[in-house]
Amino acid sequence: MLWRGDIRGKACFVEETILDKTFRADVKELSVVIKGPYDVLREADKDVHYLSRMSNLACRLPDFVRSTPLTADQRDNLLRDVGNKTDMLLNPIHAVARPLDPMLRDITVFSNVDLMAQSESVVERLIGKKGSSRFDDCMDQLYESQFGRGVFDTPKAKKRVEKDNAVLGWEANGAGRQEIWDVALKVLSIWTTSSPTERNLSTWALVQTKSRNKSLRFKSRGEDEPTIAAGWLGFTTDWEDEDLGGDMANVTEVVDDIEVAGEGTASAVGSTNIRHDPTTSSISRWAHRLVQVEEAEDADEADENNEDDVPDEKWVDERSDSYRSWTRKEDIVPYVEEQQRPEQRELHDEDEQPAEEHREQQQEEQQEQQQEKQTHERSEEQQLKQQQGDEEQQQHDRDEEQQQQREKEQRQQRVDPADQQETGVQSAKDVHGEGEAEGEHGRSEVQGFYGSSLQSPVVGRHGAHPGRVWDPAAYCAPRG
């Protein structure tokens, strides 16, 4: 691919410039110059509340330039250009941020007459007029903060200064000094990151400001008809909003077939019918709507300008007035939503104590209930295990008894039949002997009742006793 001649020339120029040792030396010197400002700006992007460091940077920029090995002409030109770009950082609102930063504590700031004069002007505007009690108290508190006296000399305050930014340090330790506390929060809460400040501090042409945005809008340059502003849009001349000539002359509007009933056919959906009206003027309806929109925008801009104009609030300064956007209104609210004094915090803590005690009591009750529930479950498990053990022991005992009974029966079945017969005969003899003994006893009783010479009528022929064997044929009733 072959480039055009002008493109090849530019590419060669870039290549020669990069390879040139002089260019590299210039870049090296420039990196040395911008190292200090770049470090501070990088820290400013990390912490949005960094206004005091920006002012300190602006004061140290001449030292950065002078410490760089440059020629006298280069140094003078660089100082002039840097001064023109950073004068906006030397306003009173930036100056008062320098002594208010606890991390930049330095008693030599009071020897800077210009800085203290600008700081007093800010205090006079935000707190009270010079000579009033509030003004004097605020300046005294500023001296105490710089010298590290009172609440600013405690170990807690020193630790917070080392870890936190300036705003958090004043929130934690400056509540006892109301005047300086108010000034510090209002001033140090101003953002310094690029997002909220690029429209106010940037000088690049690509930043869209209000004045540049106006050039994009349609303006009425003629007495009769509106025109479009040319200029940077690329038009060589102003293009007037007139209708075309020829067949398109006197065209007032373009109407869709769907909107005009009866003027188009169903097959013509999607096409347009151009309606000619030679009696009307050559200004289209779109132009009329544009004029109405411009009038409404102009009215809104006038209202906004009237709202911004605050009477009797002007800050006289010979160098610059860009600081007015920071402190035009006195009621500048810091980024924190609410600030509580120590008394309010104590009351708030006292109100929270009963609630905390109630929550702790509820937690203790819940823990006790849970422990009781666990203890009850463990006792039930132990009882269940004990019952199961008892049942198993009883079942084991019953099984042993049954086993012993079965063994006993088996032993009885194994006895010899002869022993069984002898046992039966012996038992029969025993029964017969017992019967005879009982018979003798009965006979003796009968003889004792009737006498020894008479025979009992109930005794049979064979001497049987009624208690043993009754013989009806042997019974003889006495006669006479």
Image (spheres, helix red, strand yellow):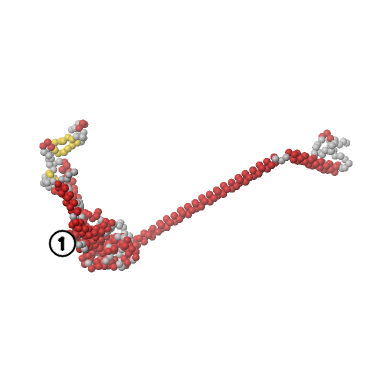
| Spot occupied by residue 431 in the image (x, y as percentages of width and height) | 78, 41
Q: Which residue is mark 1?
A: 73
Whether residue 59 is visible to the viewer of this picture, yes or no, is no
Disc 1 element = helix
Q: Quadrant of residue 24?
A: bottom left
Does 9 sit above or below residue 253?
below
Image quarter hosting the N terminus? top left
| Spot occupied by residue 132 in the image (x, y as percentages of width and height) | 24, 66
Asked whether 14 or 190 is in front, the reply is: 14
Does 369 sit above or below residue 434?
below
Q: Quadrant of residue 51?
A: bottom left
Residue 443 in the figure: left or right of residue 357: right
- What amino acid type is highlighted by mark number 1? Asp
Whether residue 479 is visible to the viewer of this picture, yes or no, is yes
Residue 390 in the figure: left or right of residue 15: right
Q: Residue at x 32, y 67 (%)?
A: 153
